[in-house]
Image (cartoon, helix red, strand yellow):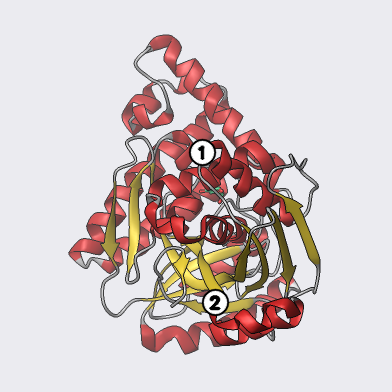
Amino acid sequence: MSEPFEAGALADALVDAEPWTAPRREEIRVVRAPGRVNLIGEHTDYNEGFVLPAAIDLEIRIAYLPTDDRRVELVRLDTGQRDGFELDTPRPRAGTWLDYVAGTAWALAEAGLQLTGLRGVVASTLPTSAGLSSSAAIELASAWALLDDRAAEVDRFELARRCQRAENGYVGVMGGLMDQFAESCGVAGSALFLDCRSSAWRAVPLPPGVDLVVLHTGSPRQLGRSEYNVRRSQCEAAVAALARDDPGIHSLRDVTPMALAAEAGTLEPVEFRRARHIVSENDRVGATVRALEGGDLAAVGELFAASHASLRDDYDVSSPELDAMVEIAVAVPGVIGARMTGAGFGGCTVNLVRPDAVGALRAAVLDRYPARTGLTPMILPVRTAFGAGRVA
Ligand code: GLA
């Protein structure tokens, strides 16, 4: 990334974009929101299941000065694009990046929170369309800027819910809570275990001697949005069919692998496979937490492999590129586990790697992945990070 990213450089960029801020340079604030990578628990969040994501140190930052004119205007430093809206005038969705900012303003105002007008610049080290949730990151960074000094008073989990509401109710994408949750509540050094039904969560420290490497396939998530909604309806259809025999079933969270196997005949074959992924994935999240806490990395590797296979064969959201990336990675000695991460249909894999094997993984990916797919991979070693907030 060539755009500026340190707080001082971002303040300079704001002064360049908005020369009137020059005399008030000392008052410029910088907020940040991280991306996220999901370790395990894929497509389980909208089924009231379990997830284990982590916030990462690739992030979006906004440098801004509050104004009292009720206008929000931002300049993207990567493209130079400037766009804005009035806080008190309803703005219809426009199909652009600003929708995430305007949607967040709408969702925060809906909750009765007081917002400030502002002028700002936006910078990012987080690749877009990669499955690392840059959309949730722009929402959370916007929330911290729009709420200004009041942001710290809002509960982090509640803020995540507001940003999810922005995406569901304004942008029109029906995602679950995992992304906004991870990016709001992130804890450096840890993954976050969330029960999407009760909202109970806790940090799960990553054991020492485990590095996180994100591998981008170089194929963007294209079919993602429509296929995502298809998967959601298939899960709902499975629940409806299962609830006919057992009215106690309200979501796939309520179904055990054994109970599901017994119902194989009641479900359409596709619905059965979708449900089998969710039900088995929920079990794998709990098992992964126990294995991480017990230091059993071999078990973590097996759980990652089973998760990837289930997403590929039962949930049908992998791609030849994601499969190739996982196969190349797991053949490298010192790679503990590898699987696709996020919604699928392109994007990234998540890899747990012994620190001394990161070089070999990089070499193997650069050597074998382009030859197998014709695509250029991106190798992103990442660290876990804290959730969104003000940069000191
Ligand atoms: C996207 C959604 C999340 C989650 C994942 C799949 O990232 O935004 O809520 O459903 O896909 O696990």
Instruction: Look at label 1 and name its amino acid.
Output: Gly
Q: Which mark is residue 27?
A: 2
Label 2 CB sits under 8 Å from any ligand 1 atom = no
Question: Is any part of residue 15 visible from this angle?
Answer: yes
The tag earlier along the polypeptide, 2 or 1, is 2
Counting from the top left corner in percent of width and height, residue 224 is at: 68, 48
Near-viewer residue (169 or 338) = 169
Q: Please tell me whether mark 2 or mark 1 is closer to you in this view.
A: 2
Near-viewer residue (384 or 183) = 183
Horizontal side, residue 69 vs residue 275: left or right: right
Quadrant housing residue 64: bottom right
Could you say whether the residue bearing mark 2 is in a helix, strand or loop?
helix
Instruction: Look at label 2 and name its amino acid.
Output: Glu
Mark 2 is surrounded, within 10 Å at the Cα level, by few (under 14), some (14 to 19) or many (20 or more) other residues, namely: few
Quadrant housing residue 372: bottom right
Horizontal side, residue 152 vs residue 226: left or right: left
